[in-house]
Image (tube, rainbow, N blue to C red):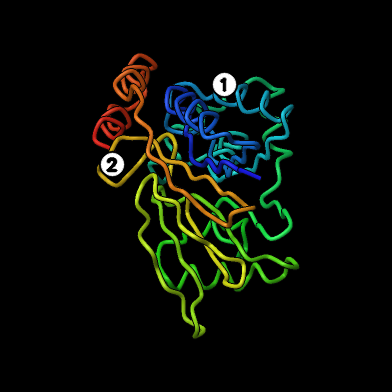
Amino acid sequence: MRLALLSDIHGNIQALDACLAHARAQQTQRFAFLGDMVGYGANPAQVVERIKLLTEEGAIVLKGNHDEMAVNPPEVVKTVGDSTAAWTHHQLSDAQRQWIDALPLTQHLDTVLLVHASADAPELWRYVYDQRAATASLNAATQWSGVRYVFGGHVHLQTLYYRGATDGLMMFIPQPGVAVPVPKHREWLSTVGSVGQPRDGNPQAMYALLDTERAQLTFHRVSYDHGAAAQAIRRAGLPEFFAHRLEQGR
């Protein structure tokens, strides 16, 4: 199976459509959305509706922290992430909010575990940003039988860790478009990057493609009209910071 792994769309319909088209061109057979469909971006309702339609093709959808905040906005804004939650909440229909609220935090598919943040207490939204956090997530994944691969998002970066000959994890920096062998005799953890809000200085959208038959993982970067996405944020009256961030890839 060729499984496209997409995370952190953040209301960016331009980036989502570009990644979907790219993934279909790679003969993707199934889509998995690892959370944070909304938040920050100008088109949350369109993004949610696009992903809901894909569930009719068997797409897997998880809930992320921004999805949760869109359903239940915080009463007091404490972070940048909190700042668009109430706006997003009102952009979504009752039916869309109910659908989001019912989404799971994890999905187990044979040897694969999908999660938005860390498999170590997924509901706490812990960031997997280094070997220590990756180890905690991979260790926690052992509660799901047979798991060899853990895929998540949340950190908006593309990374790959594997357990080597010792107990420690090794980190591998993937190159876009280059298939990486991920044999099942090892344990792997990857953050697949952000479709709608890359933060590595490159505005191109991110996603990854897992080929389970060949045991290969390919990280992709996809060009899209990030200028149009930024302008949509400005037209919506959202903070200029979010538009500038898309243009800079930060």
Q: Please, what is the three-letter code of the amino acid marked with disc 2? A: Arg
* Res. 225 image quadrant: top left
Q: Residues within 10 Å of mark 1 (few under 14, many from 20)?
A: many
In the depicted view, which residue is nearer to us: 87 or 147? 147
The image shows a total of numbered marks equal to: 2
**184 is higher (above) or lower (below) than 247:** below
* Res. 69 image quadrant: top right
In the depicted view, which residue is nearer to us: 27 or 238? 27
In the depicted view, which residue is nearer to us: 221 or 134? 221
Q: To which residue does mark 1 refer?
A: 45
Question: Residue farthest to the top?
Answer: 235
The residue located at (63%, 70%) in the rendering is: 140
**95 is higher (above) or lower (below) than 144:** above
Relative to 74, 131 lies left or right = left
Label ID, residue 250: 2
Q: Residues within 10 Å of mark 2 (few under 14, many from 20)?
A: some
Residue 101 drawn at (x, y percent): 69, 37
User: Tag 1, which secondary structure?
Assistant: helix
The residue located at (31%, 17%) in the rendering is: 231
The C terminus lies in which quarter of the figure? Answer: top left
Q: Please, what is the three-letter code of the amino acid marked with disc 1? A: Ala
Disc 2/disc 1 C-alpha distance (Å) = 24 Å
The N terminus lies in which quarter of the figure? Answer: top right
**206 is higher (above) or lower (below) than 171:** above
The residue located at (51%, 75%) in the rendering is: 163
User: Tag 2, which secondary structure?
Assistant: loop
Sequence-wise first label, 2 or 1: 1
**182 is higher (above) or lower (below) than 14:** below
